[in-house]
Image: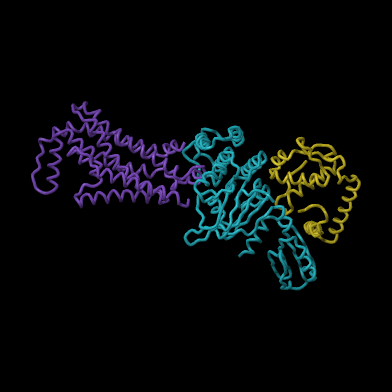
Chain colours: A cyan, B purple, C yellow
Amino acid sequence: MGESLIIETSGLRKTFGEIEALRGLDLQVPAGSICGFLGRNGAGKTTTIKVLLGLIRATGGEARVFGLPAGEERASVEIRRRAALVSEAEDLYGAMTVEQMIRFTASFFPGWRSDLQARLLRRFDLRSGTTIKRLSQGMRTRLALLLALCRGAELLVLDEPTSGLDPAAAEEVLQALVTYIAEEPKTIFLCSHQIAEIEQIADRVAIIDHGRLVLSGSLDALQRSFRRISMVFDRDAPAVEFRGAGVARVRREGRALTVFSNDGGDAVLDQARALHPVSVEVAPVGLKEIFFETIAAED
Amino acid sequence: MLWYKSWLETRWRFLIGLGVLLCSAVATVYTYPQVLRLLPLVSPQGHGALSAEIRQSIELSRHYRGFIWLQWFRQNSIDWTTVFAILLGTSGVVSNSRQTGFTLSLPLSRTRVAGVRGAAGLGELFALVFLPSIVVPLLSPAIGQTYSMADTLIHGACLFVGATVFFSAAFLFSHVFDDVWRPLLLAFALVVAFAVLDKALHAPAIFSVMSGETFFRTGRLPWPGLLACVAASGAMGWITLRIFMHRDL
Amino acid sequence: MLFRPNASSGLPIYLQLMEQVKHAIETGALRPGEQLPGIRPLAEQLVMNPNTVAKAYRELEHEGVIELRQGSGAFVSRNAAIRRAPDSLRAAQSMVASTVQRLRGRGLGDDEIRRLVEAEIARIPEKGGRRG
């Protein structure tokens, strides 16, 4: 493939006391992609991000960003020079004004994009003199985004950037991201509960559950290969074990039998027809259902 | 701009502390004429440690230098400086503020983040010690007295070195605990512990070093005490950096 | 003329975009030789991943529907392979209309009809073309 991996973890483990937050995570994010990172609360998303950015030290395994080891102090400083984090925007300095915050952040980045700064200030309608603690959450997220983008970061790591935002504000965030990635090759690692947003702009998806990666791949490929095959019988649905790879989940309810296949569904379809159901339907599956079915299969 | 940020976060505590100490210094100087007038009227009888102490204080106060040492360097200045050393050591510390995520996502080593914060705090502590103390030799002529600038600077140095111990302790506790209260409580507990030890052991301890008692009485600097303070502060500072480097945040 | 694909339908967005372009050409909204919106402006307008737009355009080029000219942009092919006479599209429309009416006459609801059609489309093994 020859694609360089911007983020790569292998067997990543992190234990907090008795809690195993990460149990051998193998994550790979290629350069130039928008990768959506999905998982339940407590599945390990924020822990992963913190390990990648050097806020937390892993207990075991390896994590690399830009090929640099995330656990080493000096490499981590270099990582943070080239990567930016936008998290739930409550950690901007409340006492500073917008302008002070910008100047403060810009002082650490010789390559600060003042042209982008001017453009985004206008577009986000941020006023220089406003104190940050007076900004609404939506405005703070926009400022956090401005700071991350003007840094010229090659990798943007976003942790729930649109949580608490109204749809218009959320859309603006997505648009700013899309514009950013369109201008130059960048990578975006987006942790979000908003599955619809991930479907909208991500080209890769990684799903984490109980500290491990349970599904990952290009979104197109997942959408092409996941199928829901629904069968109805004229008697109680047979308790048949569907054989073979590609069966994610089987659900039996009275005379209805539903199989989720992550393999295109052909093999399942053949087996299904052999059971002589009254009706067979094959339907594509949206990311939300893919997510739920994958997680449920893990429980 | 880390220095500027540190300043923004600590400026109120610093300015209030400076204000309090300056007022205290001015008040101390201006109290002297009254003390002089009252002294002949006081002659404590009685035996016991307390009476002995009072008699000692009276004796010292007959001379301006003794009075300043007693009131300013041994009391007012130490009390307030200790309090503000602790307050400065606990304010704006990254790890127990909510700003962790942003600051530590900047390309800064943890050593630099904690180091700049500590250095800025020490700088403020330095100003907090010397500026009010300099008031004494500058203002004394107004009441017809003189106080040696050299003495001021030496006492200031002793006070500063001792105060850094409390600053470093507060700084260390702030990097260990995530909340705002425990570092403060522990630091003040430390002060109380030292005060109790002081009384119990009757041995010159940290407060004696801070007041420059040895210098006042003998003209020699309390080198062992000063070195012990420097060593303690340095050790606590080093431990703070090590802890901060390895903490999960 | 090009509108936001439905991201949650389970159908890959790039395929939906390709269909939209083909449909636009069929109905005449886009004519041979005309320029398509640039990848970047289109991505910004539809708030889509530019890689996805680029993929759709590449596939369309592979199918001969459009041409990508270095430095100038994307243009509808002069001999767009999917060009059909407007007549056949109208004929197809009337076939669909009569089928839908017949199924309704049998008592099927619109939702059921829609599901049957989608299921049928999804069922047919994907012939030819690069879907990999």
Quarter residue C25 falls in: top right
In the rendered image, the vertical position of residue A246 relative to residue B183, given as above or below: below
Quarter residue A167 falls in: top right
In the rendered image, the vertical position of residue A245 relative to residue C44, given as above or below: below
Q: Is residue A23 visible?
A: yes
Q: Is residue B233 left or right of residue A44?
A: left
Question: Of all residues shown, which one is farthest toward the front?
Answer: A2
Comparing C72 with A261, the one in front is C72
Comparing A187 with C10, the one in front is A187
Q: Is residue C116 left or right of residue A183?
A: right
The residue positioned 25% from the left and 37% from the top of the image is B155
Question: Of all residues shown, which one is farthest toward the left?
Answer: B45
Q: x%, y% of residue C102?
A: 87, 58
Comparing C72 with A142, the one in front is C72
Q: Is residue A90 visible?
A: no
The residue positioned 20% from the left and 41% from the top of the image is B214
Quarter residue C33 falls in: top right
Q: x%, y% of residue B71?
A: 21, 38
Picture mark count? 0
In the rendered image, the vertical position of residue A240 relative to residue C85, given as above or below: below
Q: x%, y% of residue B97?
A: 44, 46
Q: x%, y% of residue A286?
A: 70, 55
The residue positioned 40% from the left and 51% from the top of the image is B176
Q: Is residue B157 left or right of residue A51?
A: left
